[in-house]
Amino acid sequence: MPERTSYDAVIVGGGHNGLVAAAYLARAGRSVLVLERLDHTGGAAVSTRAFAGVDARLSRYSYLVSLLPPKIVRDLGLRFAVRKRTVSSYTPAVRDGRPTGLLVGGGEARTRTAFAELTGSDREFAAWQDFYGATGRLAERVFPTLTEPLPTRERLRTVVDDDALWHALFERPLGELVEETFADDLVRGVVLTDALIGTFAAAHDPSLRQNRCFLYHVIGGGTGDWDVPIGGMGALTDALADAARRAGAEIVTDCAVTGLATDGRSAEVSCEAGTIGARRVLVNAAPRELARLLGEDPPPPAEGAQLKVNMLLTRLPRLRDTLVDPREAFSGTFHIAEGYRQLEDAYRQAASGALPTAPPSEIYCHSLTDPSILGADLVRQGYQTLTLFGLHAPARLFAADNDTTRDRLLAATLAELDTHLAEPLAGCLAHDAEGRPCIEARSPLDLDRELGLPGGNIFHRDLAFPYADPEDAQAGGAPARWGVATGHPTVLLCGAGAVRGGGVSGIPGHNAAMAVLEEG
């Protein structure tokens, strides 16, 4: 039960962004209460023993770290670390009837050779170097702005300081840039995948939602690297909860918030513990949930578009491409059916209401980089985890029969993987204490039910470019300047649905806390 009936700040939701906000505000001397409906904190950033009787703690939902600013780790004194992956990606292919693939990693010379062997020349590697050199410069310039007051569009364009790149990424569909830059279909597809994580769009979608997704995937940490959280994703949220408590914040779990009211000067939060007053309420939940709590009309429906699969293997499967060690291929991102044409075909099929015939997905093995998530016996026996993220699986496809559709898509996805393996993946799956294969899948509708992600959308709604209209920013006070404003002065949005939200970043939590402190 909460210790008081009124607080400077009440935070609705104990996911990582809410915990970041709680820690910052409590460190500044504010009285802070976090209310979480589940029996644990962490939201989608948790580590779970997913399989009965098996000592393996998997990052069940979110699983890699890129957008978490080192500033937040330093400011809050977090006992948390990430580890680099030595291989960026491996994409299997068949050329001239021969199993082959593209390995990106292991040093520049090795990557150059891999490009040349796949494509027959140095052209694509040179284009790759130029392309990611440009996105690297973009990351260095844009990433620091994410924990500053929201810049205007023109201010951010000045920060980018590259008119051609700005035009290509902020004004034109990404497909145009990809097609102008690269000639090889497989290379084009590897590039495009970063625009489609949790985002249902074609390469030439005029809405540019694919551009916004791509931007956030290439600017993380100022480098665009996607790193492995040591101890699993739950290690981060456990560290955040510890930091918030050490600073004096109260965290109450098993306490669902049922309503929110405000008169513009203060607010009241209704929950199972009663009614609690607050000077400010920070909502670490989707805009849909905010509207429900306020009794307002919901925002336009959001839709997720992914299949999430967790697996535990007794060993990694052998590859048809015998020139690549599975330990390298699976340590980075293993792309399946993600050639450029394959991605576009899968999008068109899903948009027409059918499951893709060759479902695109990507896999990585956490335990190769960080075996600490496995018990000592499993490590000795050579067990490994696999995390699969399927693309172009919009929630609408699951509406009629979620369970059957999920099972069909899982089977088709694993069959597509098997085409690149020298043995069926099923033969490598571990079994739990009850003899069941160690594999679990989640559709967008499952994620909505379990985590409150609207339509299973992992970003809560479409991502926004990280800039603001100057008039809105000035008129809305500190919350608008930090990208966390709602229609109510005393209520702020600190979850993934805020501007510059999405991903495991802590940025919306940081920015909501800064807005509160700026207002005094």
Image (cartoon, rainbow, N blue to C red):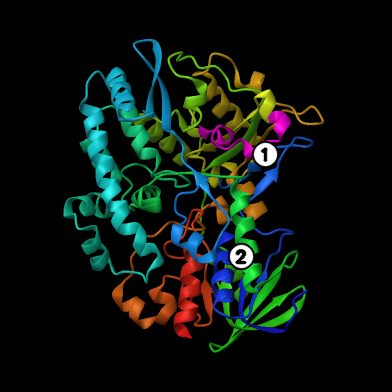
State the CA–CA distance, disc 2 to disc 1.
39 Å
Q: Is residue 420 above or below residue 350?
A: above
- Residue 318's x, y, as percent? 54, 16
Q: Is residue 27 above or below residue 341?
A: below
Helix, strand or loop status at disc 1: helix
Residue receiving disc 1: 403
Helix, strand or loop status at disc 2: helix
Image-quadrant location for residue 158:
bottom left
Q: Earlier in the sequence, mark 2 or mark 1?
A: 2
Q: Is residue 108 visible?
A: yes
Secondary structure predominantly adopted by residues drawn in magenta: helix
Verify whether residue 254 appears in magenta: no
Give the amino acid type for the residue marked by disc 2 in the picture. Ala
- Residue 461's x, y, as percent? 48, 58
Q: Which residues are magenta?
A: 363-378
Q: Is residue 471 above or below residue 418?
A: below
Q: Is residue 42 visible?
A: no
**For this rendering, which residue is in front, 328 or 264?**
328
